[in-house]
Amino acid sequence: MREVRLTFRKWISHNVIDCLAARLNYIEKKNNPGGKRQLWCYTTTMVIRKKAFATLTTHLKEVVESDNKFLELKEFNIIIIPMIENKHFYLICLDLENKRVKVIDNMVNNNGFYKMMTGTKFKEIGSPCKVKHYMVGYLKAVKHPMAACMAGTMLTKKRVEWATNDNFNDCGVFAMRHMEMYRGSDVKFECGFSTRKDIQDMQLKNMRIKIATKLLFSEANVYKGTVMDLAKETTHGLKDKRVQKMLDKEALKQEECWNMLNR
């Protein structure tokens, strides 16, 4: 069982992001079993070039549950790869249908976490470009019809209005919201985050609660029954009116922030 911790203002583990990826894949497979769909990979770190193809193949096998048909990636129109580099989370999104590769990050600047730069020498280029190179190599190996087009696609960073300059601990929360909301380069990317820091901080706090709830009570969570039983035991003896009033007040405040995210 993967440990899931979403303590407010604390840096989260990649396990939480991987759990969300599993949940999103479960929902996508259930809701869209026959048509093109999105694929959310598990968190990726940079690997040695010589081992890249083998590592990528193993990584994808885990995500598609070793289904050889899905390993060819022809069933997917968007592939989302959560990256972690220098303890910073960001996304690399491959939009196969629209021939686009985007980096999505909550930081205005890369702040030394990763490099976007390209170059003539492979060792000089940034991690996003390397990942794109590895993915194109994989697409070619499985004879994907979009391999040649994706090889010629320029990788760019997507501009987001709610980007931050100094929020390092919430990068994983931003990444998870971005994972949920990205639908391709031809669809407006709107996550509901405020540009006001005080409101955004409350939204991020609320996001942690919402994500934890989604993961714990997801049909994909084999421990869902145990979680529900424990929750019932915990709340069964809650009769303190003062505590209940405080909880109701906090819930209302969080709901107001969440409504902004849902617009």
Image: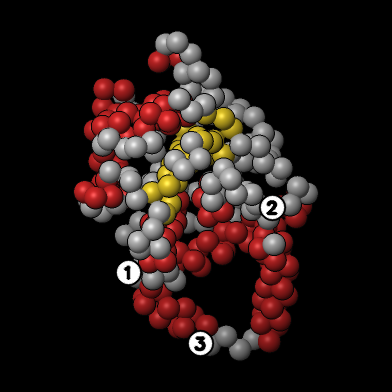
Ranked by sequence position, the earlier of labels 3 and 2 is 2
Which residue appears at 32% of the width and 37% of the height?
144
Among the 4 quarters of the image, the one containing residue 52: top left
> Which disc number belongs to residue 236?
3
Q: Mark 1 or mark 2, which is nearer to you?
A: 2
Viewer can see residue 149: yes
- Quarter of the image with the C terminus is bottom right
Which quadrant of the structure image shows residue 23?
bottom left
Q: Amino acid at mark 3?
A: His
How dense is the environment of label 1, judged by Cα within 10 Å: few (below 14), some, or many (20 and up)?
A: few
Q: CA distance from mark 3 to mark 1?
A: 23 Å
Horizontal arrangement in the rendering, residue 60 relative to residue 96 (left or right): left
Q: Residue at x 75, y 55 (%)?
A: 199
Q: Is residue 55 left or right of residue 119?
A: left
Image location (x, y in percent) of residue 125: 46, 18
Q: Which residue in the protein does label 2 denote?
A: 193
Q: Residue 108 appears at what percent x and percent y?
A: 67, 34
- What is the quadrant of residue 51 in the picture? top left
Q: Residues within 10 Å of mark 3 (few under 14, many from 20)?
A: few
- Secondary structure at badge 2 equals loop
